[in-house]
Image: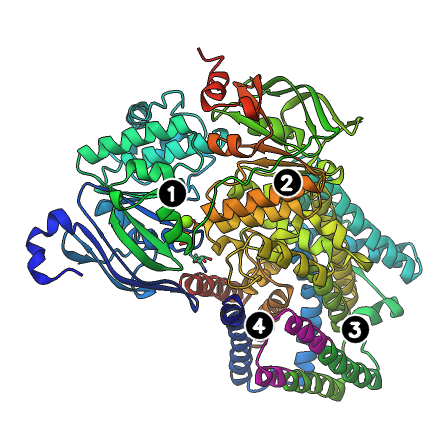
Amino acid sequence: MNSKDEETIVNEKDFLVFENITKYFSSVKVLDQVNCTIKKGEVHALVGENGAGKSTLVKILAGVYPTPEYSGTIYLEGNPCDFKNIRHAEEAGVCIIYQELELIPSMSVSENIFLGYEPKNHGIIDHDRMYRDAAILLDQLNAATIHPETLVERLSVGKQQIVAICRALSKHAKIIIFDEPTSALSDSEVNILFSIIRNLKEQGVTCIYISHKLNRILEISESITVLRDGKSIISGPRDDFDEQALITHMVGRELEKKYPRCSHTAGDVVLEVRDFTVIDPSIPKTLVDHVSFSVRTGEILGFAGLMGAGRTELFMALFGAYDDYDITGEVYLNGTLLSIKTPRDAIKRGIGLVVENRKEHGLVSCMHIINNSILANIPNMVSSFGTIDENLAIKQTETYAQEFSLRYSSLEQLVGSLSGGNQQKVVISKSLMPNPTVLIMDEPTRGIDVKAKFDIYNIMNKLIDEGVAIVMVSSELPEILGMSDRIMVMCEGKLTGEVFYHDATQEKIMEYATKIKE
Amino acid sequence: MKEQKTPLLNRIHIESLGIRSFAMVGALIIIWVLFTILTDGTFISVRNLSNLFRLTGIMGILVIGMVGCLVSGVFDLSIGSVVGLTGAITGILLEQMGMHYLVAFSISLLVGVAIGVWQGFWIAYRGVPAFIVTLGGMMIFRGITVLVTNGCSIPISNRPFAVFGQGYMPQWLNIVIGVFGVIAFILFDQQHRNKRKSYNFALQSSLLMMLKYIAMLVIVAVFVFSLNSYQGIPYSVVILIIFYLLFAFIYNKTQYGRYVYAVGGNQVAAKLSGIDIKKIYMKVFIIMGLLSALAGNLLTSRLATATPNAGNGFELDTIASCVIGGISLAGGRGALFGAIVGTLVMTSLENGMSLMNMTAAWQDVVKGLILLSAVWFDVANKKK
Ligand SMILES: Nc1ncnc2c1ncn2[C@@H]1O[C@H](COP(=O)(O)OP(=O)(O)OP(=O)(O)O)[C@@H](O)[C@H]1O
Ligand SMILES: [Mg+2]
């Protein structure tokens, strides 16, 4: 690819070169002779289906898998480089923001940002400076609302993403890798991120950008590489591609449309929520403020809003997930008043929840696919002496794995080693297995590729036909507009609007979503 | 494509599991050979092995319970004191109150259960960390033991009770059980294999399978006939085997077992999947209390005395055995089988070093180093 005479201008054109990168996990080939060239100061996008190997490729660059673990060469500014570990890579100016956030929940925002690089004064951590610098960084990202001393566990996933970005920014990196930074961010937050990226570009920072939001990729990137099944399929300047072309290269065939909307006829009210209020007594703060709504069979009820609007808190509280919040209000299922104290009660009554944060709330990463998928349904799978019917467990897991075209090497693979999107599919399978009558899906397609999204939408349609009522919480407006029959909008813990899908527009929803702030 | 890949990754999975077990068994053999040489063969004499297995029987019972604690992500530091207290209670009931041995034994087990309920209650329903509750328990129950015994040992003269920890199974029964055991093992394994085959899951190669059966046969035959050549298999070993089988079943096949692993792996995800975490912890500690009481009675019976400091330090030995056997202190990982092999490693060390007349201080140094290197082996292996 790069002949010798080109090496004179290496700094500009071949700033970063991946040459024949091949990587195995155990004996499964995950990357197969990947080639890719990245120019200095550009934004280079990596796209591909779930499990195509994007995260693995950038982890190799970031020193997560040092040499004998892969073969091939990486050239940085013309010199072959091989980072022994993450710190080594960071010192050479390569920083990565992981797909599955690697923050320490029990530490504060500023401590997380400077973890391992704390500003010191005679060997003692200079907390004042750390605090000040963190505030400056947060301010740069227009996220001054995040207090540097807040504990990370108190932040939503979206805000945690911002903290992770600050962490990379603080290291003055030459190359910053964004592994799906936007999957948890709303559109306006993505805009903020993009302005940050453009800013970085002007300062000569090279960015590698991984995402499944193809329209936004086309907006920010200057060149794009498509991976499929661990191979680099095509690489070229952004102008060579449009969304359809990217999808075709990714999937290997054409995909007609993005949202398979079917006409549903809403039936009776199944779930009715009245005056639901959630208060966090420790701060104290009202997270959900007198929310009332109802869901009917055969409809998809969308919940739109900005990050922090209280949608996740509403449904986690409804599901019985919180022990130490004050919760008031009434929940009726098919007309009978429910008292849900624990998730167990909710599941027994036929309510299912696909959690927002799959790593912390969704998966037991040291267990395999089968055990994770059946976890919520085990009570329905026991025979004599409390033994689990393994046949049934495997059969059901297999059914769902096929329906979602899960990419795995064996059903006994640990879920921690699945790609991000495939982990999400396991989380959804888990919630579907007990056959809920009301299914709440909190950001169901986060980190999932176009084709898998399509599969999930189709499954939602199928569930609707079977008489299940679906609540879909999503920060992706096109998804909300594309799939829901009725849309609720929340802002700062309050319901601020309700729209039917024929009347819904992005503008209208955004107006409701920011109603209180203005 | 999926079908092609399946066997590959699985084989690796099995092999990596295999490495752990092989290393453990290998270490055990090395330890045995070493002690045999160092003690001029005394170590390998049937009489000593019988003794060693009896000790393993007692520690193994505790390890079975501790596996439940560690896998679900908690510690129990109180078990040494519970062993002491329940032993003392049996001693008092037998000798000072003159009760029937079965009644005394049952009451003592009930006390173990009650202790489990007490500790489980504070941990599950009052949210006090298990470390603290059981550290407190360690002091409380040791204190009570000293109080009820007035700090004196209670010699036990009850014959039937002594049989429990000192007696042996009839020799013909050992052979019958051994034969049936091997047949049952092969039948179960074949059934399991067929099931895996029907799902297209990876299988052990037939060669490995045959080797496994032959190894099983040889081990059982050597075990039964050598112990028979002395006096037979000690009851405490039989009790351990029964409880091992029971709990291997519980931890691997039942709802409760699966929940224990899930709770230890990710407590929040487990809760959001509808698992009643409090109930799981309650059960974990009740089982631990019951098994501690059983071990306490076995120990008392074997020593024919209830001493106020019986079981001192057992909690750390038990945790060390589990860790050597591959149980993760972070929770969610590890298998009962490994932990039992780990127990055998620990008790072999203790027994062998005692035969060599090493002081307790040196024994601790060696045991500590072994613990360290076992965990290092795991960590280094995981990196690869
Ligand atoms: N530690 C691991 N052990 C075994 N297999 C792994 C491991 N990490 C990743 N894999 C496998 O490698 C493949 C590529 O994973 P990778 O995370 O790079 O995908 P990705 O392109 O980032 O997908 P996504 O869009 O879902 O994040 C997947 O099939 C995954 O199962
Ligand atoms: Mg990824």
Compared to residue B60, the image places residue A489 above or below, namely above
- Residue at point 45%, 13% (across, down): A517
In the image, residue A419 lies at what x, y percent? Answer: 46, 52
Please tell me which of labels 2 and 3 falls first in the chain: 3
Residue B383 in the image: state x and y as whole percent: 40, 61
Task: Decide whether residue B209 is among the magenta residues.
Answer: yes
- In terms of secondary structure, where does tag 2 sit? helix
Q: Which residues are magenta?
A: B188-212
Tag 2–tag 3 contact (CB < 8 Å): no
Q: To which residue does mark 1 refer?
A: A211
Q: Residue at x 49, y 32 (%)?
A: A153
Q: Report the residue marked by disc 2.
A: B272
Identify the chain of the residue marked 4, using the numbered disc in the image.
Answer: B
Q: CA separation, marks 1 and 3?
A: 63 Å
Report how far apart the C-alphas of labels 1 and 4 lie in the structure.
35 Å
Crowd tier of the residue under label 4, counting other residues whose Cα lies within 10 Å: few below 14, some 14–19, many 20 or above: many
